[in-house]
Every structure is written in C-alpha cells, then in structure tokens.
Image (cartoon, helix red, strand yellow):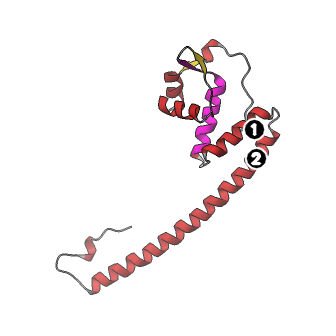
Amino acid sequence: MTVETAPAATEDASELLGIQEAAKSLGVTMRTLRFYEDKDLIAPQRVGTMRIYSRREIGRMQLILRGKKLGFSIREIKEFLDLYDVDPEHHAQVSQLVVKIGKRMKDLRRQRTAIEQTLEELRTIESQAKAWLAKHPHPQTNPSELPHD
C-alpha cells in the first residue's frame, strides 16, 4: 500500500463517478462498494439516493483492495485509512504501515514453512502408499495409473 497525498478538497465534475462507473473502473461489483461503505471505509457523497465517488473515494478503494490482496484484515485497513485522515504528513501512517508489513511478512513466512512441512509429509505418505500398492497389487488397481505430482 503506497503512501499518497490526499486529493484536493474541490473535485472537478469529470472526476466524480456514479456507483456503476466507480465499480467498473475499480474492477469490483457495486455490492463490493456498498459493503465497504457499510464498513465505514469509504463515504461517497449522496445526491438524493445516488452515490457519487470522488477521486478521494476511488483512491481509498484502491488502497482497500490492495490491502485485501496483501492479506490485511478490514480492521487493519480501517486503522490505516483512519491514520491517513488524522496525520496530514503521514508519519504515523507510514510508521504503522511498516509495523503491519513486518507482522504480515512474519505470518506469511510461518505459513510457508507449515505448507512446506505439510507437502513433504504428504509426499512421504504418497510414496509409502504407492510402494504398498506395488507390493500388494489388486486386480482392479494399476499403480502406474495413479496420479502423479
């Protein structure tokens, strides 16, 4: 999640999008936009019942989507976005980002180790099972027809 400056307070009308256009430009559904609005992560302007997305809201959605892709929880993303609003110089935001990235990388390394251990154990069990089948042939099972990795 890169650190970006906030858009100008006044928006050019060409930078305002309805929900359909915003969803299309972000590659998400309108339901996704409403979901993040319900979670107070974005706050599109309202004109009657119509939602209007400014450059700021589109930018926030891009950060949300990137955060989700990187495995951060909605709560973590909300904390990060709240810091963005409170700290105009972004020091607190960047410091918090560094901490969260370090934690996420540690979690991913731990998961990778667990996956590698599980794969190795499964390979061992598969090898043992295939060896057993080769020693104990069954008329309807041909070990050479078993799936390979």
Q: Could you say where residue 25 lies in the image, as x and y percent from the top left?
A: 53, 27
Secondary structure category for the residue under label 2:
helix
Q: Position of residue 113 (x, y in %)?
A: 58, 67
Q: Quadrant of the N terminus?
A: top right
Q: Nearer the viewer, residue 12 or 42?
A: 42
User: Residue 96 got which mark?
Assistant: 2
Determine the residue positioned at 28% across, 83% down. 134
Neighbourhood count class around disc 1 (C-alpha, 10 Å): few under 14, some 14–19, many 20 upward: some
Q: Quadrant of the C terminus?
A: bottom left
Point out the stretch of residues depicted in magenta.
Answer: 50-68
Residue 77 location, x and y as percent?
A: 65, 42
What residue lies at 35% left-to-right and 68% top-to-bottom?
148
94 to the left or right of 42:
right
Q: Secondary structure at mark 1?
A: helix
Looking at this view, is 101 or 147 the one in front? 101
Q: Amino acid at mark 2?
A: Gln
Dominant SS type (magenta):
helix
Q: Would residue 84 appear left or right of 27 to someone viewing this image?
A: right
Figure label count: 2
When asked about the image quadrant of residue 83, the answer is top right
Say which mark, if any, is on residue 83: 1
Specify whether residue 34 is in view: yes
Amino acid type of the residue tagged 1 in the rendering: Leu
Please give the label number shown on residue 134: none
